[in-house]
Each structure stands twice: as structure tokens, then as C-alpha cells.
Amino acid sequence: MKEVHADAVVIGAGAGGLCAAARLVHQGFHPILVEARDKVGGRATTNIIDGFIVNEGAIALEVGGVFEETFHLVGAPLDLRFPEPASAFYLDHKVVDVGKGGWGFLLGQMTKQAARILEKFAEARTGALPDGRQSTAEWLSTFTNNESVHAIFRNLCAAIFACNADELPARAFLTYFVSKGAFKRFGFGPRGTIGVWQALADAIARHGEVWLSSPAQSLLIENGAVRGVIVQRGDERVRIATDCVISNAGPKGTLALAGAGAFPADYVQRVSDLRSAANIVYNFASREPLHAAPGIVTFGKTRRLCNMATMTAACPELAPPGWHLYVAYAVPKPALGDFDSEAETALGLEDLREQFPGFDEKTRMLSIRVMRDDWPAQRACAGFDLPRESAVRGLWQVGDAVKDYGNGGTQACAETAKLVVDAIAAERATQSRQPAL
């Protein structure tokens, strides 16, 4: 078996893995990033379908935080277009822009309890949060039973966290809106989301290595510490000797690579109990615009549909001339358990037909993807994440199963990369200061 050495190995070129490799480069490491697929981006990559540039999963990339900072650190361009207004609601077949009035404007039209709800958001900013056992739906029910308000909160939970309001802890929901990104400013990639990831991969490759079509086959563990990774690269197996591995394969994938025997029994059980979050992604196009909003709209009362983005309003090059490209998301019930994919997909389609009369005649469906199981929308529901550290020395995890509490989206994955690489760099600095025995 061929053997090479690396300062660090990153497994998986999704959002967390790419950001981790980039930050390692910034810290002076020469990492090897290995990816099983033939392209970067993981569950947020891009496909070309009949001339349309279609994203598989995530589309909205937040700026103004750790994600954007990662690109600046390694000199990678962050090519994004920003729709204005970026977000709105689609209620009763009308676009409702709440950019000026905000939550108060929207809720004030629906319930007399709007002031009490907004007061709780204000209290959350001071640290007064639920204990984590109460779901978002239960928390909201203490103020109002208004069906329209509950529908909006359900669809916000679904759009951001890929789960239902009765599945998401209210503490996580409030934490996200009062102290995390909350999608205040985001953009779309004019080359598809993969264009952004490829720019980051190119920056990594200037000081490290990016191996595509090179699946990790096993982690080498000796005496409780990582010693290397076995990778299948083309026709040969390669042993990468290293004492630092960052996995973006998810806890279940990482456990499979290392073997359950490398971890304590309680950690293995926590991985087994991990609840991933699911959604259904509909990519479609039309000759005539379906509505006037240029960014993302969140729906009110629906069966499963939660939000929808007009991709070509900001990025017309994503579609052939004369076409408008959209992506819509539906979240099944339950999103954290088993469900009938066919039936749940059909309910999302019914919603699209109801929201946009004549939908089947006006649109061309390009793809429908159910994100679940080993390829989910989120590897862990917010509020139920596992730790980034492991019982194996030198083995760390990044991505959407080890997020900071209450975070979501690619910003959350980028944050895990920062936290892990900062810890690795601090550990190396401490070791370098210790006198030799």
C-alpha cells in the first residue's frame, strides 16, 4: 500500500470540510482533503439538468459572519448575488414584504397576542430562554392558538432547520433568531452553489491537496489516538499517515470508518440515537414569473410546503434565456422520524398547485430530491447535536451534526470548522512550548 504523510486529513468536501481545510491552510497546515464524489459541495452542490444549473440542497449563503470570514482568510472569492428584498412572506397568494415593519407588522395583523410574542423575543436577547424541553409549537401555544401564526412559525422552523415546530426546541428557535445569523443577509451563487465551494477548494489546493473521487475507507486508531486514514484513490489504496483528522462525514459515517470499538459505549449509543432532519427539494422552471418576490418567500398555511426561492431574479444565468428558475422546499411530518416519501412528496406538490393555480401547466419540473437518512437536510436537528471532540485523540468532527446550539445552515457548518481548527492550533501551540523530555 502506498503511504504518504500529511499535517492533517479532512474527510468530506461539504461545507464543514471545506471550511475546515481552508482554516487549516490559514494556520499553516498542509492538509489533504479527501472526497468520495467527483465534485465538491456535499449536500449543497450543483447539477446541470437540460441547461438549467440546479442546486441539490442549500441555496442561501449567509454573509457577515464566520462563513464569509473563511473565504477572506485564504483569499478565495465569494461570488454571490443579493436579492432585494431578500425575504418576504407569501400569504393568500400575495407577497408580503415585512422589511420595514418586521415581525411586529406581520404578527400584528394576525393576533392580538403579537406584543406578548415580541416581548418574549426581547427577553430572549437578555438570556431568558426556555429550558430546551418545550417545543417551539408548545411555547407558541402559551400565547396564541391562531392557526395562521402557528403555520408561519412551523414553516420558519421547516425552512431554517428542516423540522416541524413540534419537533424543534423553543430554546433553539429563539437562540437562532436572537443571537445567530437568522439569515439577515444572504446571497445566491451565479454559477450555482458549487461555484462558491469550488473557489474555496481552489484556494485550499494552493497550499494543500484536494483529492476527489477518493473515498475514505477506514480510520486507523492505535492506543486511543488517530494514526491515519486509508483512502481508495483510483486503482490504488493509499495510507495517509497523520495524527490529526477532521471528519465531515457525520457521526454515523465517522463511527463506521473507525469502528464502534474505538469509542466509549455511551458515545456509540448517542450516535445511534441521533435524529437527522429531512426535507424535499423541488426544482422547477416557468416561462412566466409565478410571483414578484426576487428572493425567498415563506408560506403561511400549507400541508408541507415551507418556502421557495426565485433563483433567476438575482442570477439569470442559472437558466436558459426566457426561463425563470425556482426551488421550493417541503418538510415531511415527521421530519425526524420515518415517513412515506412518495406521500409526503405528493403533499408538497399539492401545496404548489394550491399556491400557484395552473402550476402543472405553467411549470416544468426539473428534479425532486428527498433529503433523508444517510443524505439528509440536516444530520442532527438543532438542539440535539453531538460534541465536536471525540474520545479518540486527534479526531474531530465538523458539520451539521455538531453545530453550536441553535445554529443552522452553512453558517453553522463554517462555525464548527472555526471552533475545531482554533482548538487544534491552540493544542499544537501548547505542545510546541513544552520542553523535550
Image (spheres, rainbow, N blue to C red):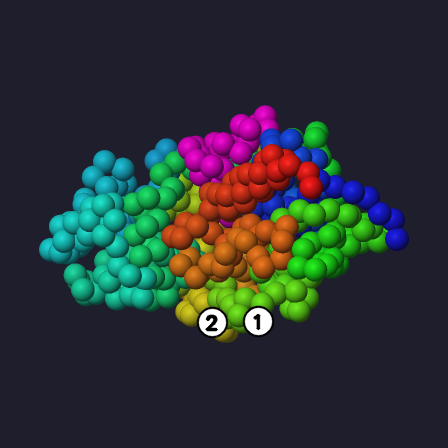
Residue 54 as seen in the image, left or right of residue 229: left
Question: Residue tagged by mark 2?
Answer: 337
Tell me which label, 2 or 1, sits earlier in the chain. Answer: 1
Q: Which residues are magenta?
A: 57-82
Residue 280 as seen in the image, left or right of residue 180: right
Q: Mark 2: which amino acid?
A: Gly
As drawn, the residue found furthest toward the top would be 75
- Write the residue at 35% across / 55% down: 172
167 is higher (above) or lower (below) than 175 = below
Give the percent coordinates (x, y) of residue 36. 71, 52
Give the percent coordinates (x, y) of residue 253. 63, 61
Count of numbered marks: 2
Say if the magenta span includes residue 158.
Answer: no
Determine the image quadrant of residue 9.
top right
Give the percent coordinates (x, y) of residue 428. 61, 39
User: What element does badge 1 sit on?
Assistant: helix
Q: Which quadrant would the C terminus be assigned to in this image?
A: top right
Q: Nearer the viewer, residue 353 or 226?
A: 226
Question: Residue tagged by mark 1?
Answer: 265
- Write the residue at 55% across / 31% down: 71
Q: Nearer the viewer, residue 299 or 107?
A: 107
Say if the magenta span includes residue 69.
Answer: yes
Q: Nearer the viewer, residue 193 or 359?
A: 193
- Write the residue at 44% across / 38% down: 62
Residue 283 visible at all: no
User: What element does badge 2 sit on?
Assistant: loop
Q: Mark 1: which amino acid?
A: Ala
The residues bearing labels 2 and 1 have C-alpha atoms spaced at a distance of: 23 Å
Residue 254 as seen in the image, left or right of residue 316: right
Determine the image quadrant of residue 295.
top left
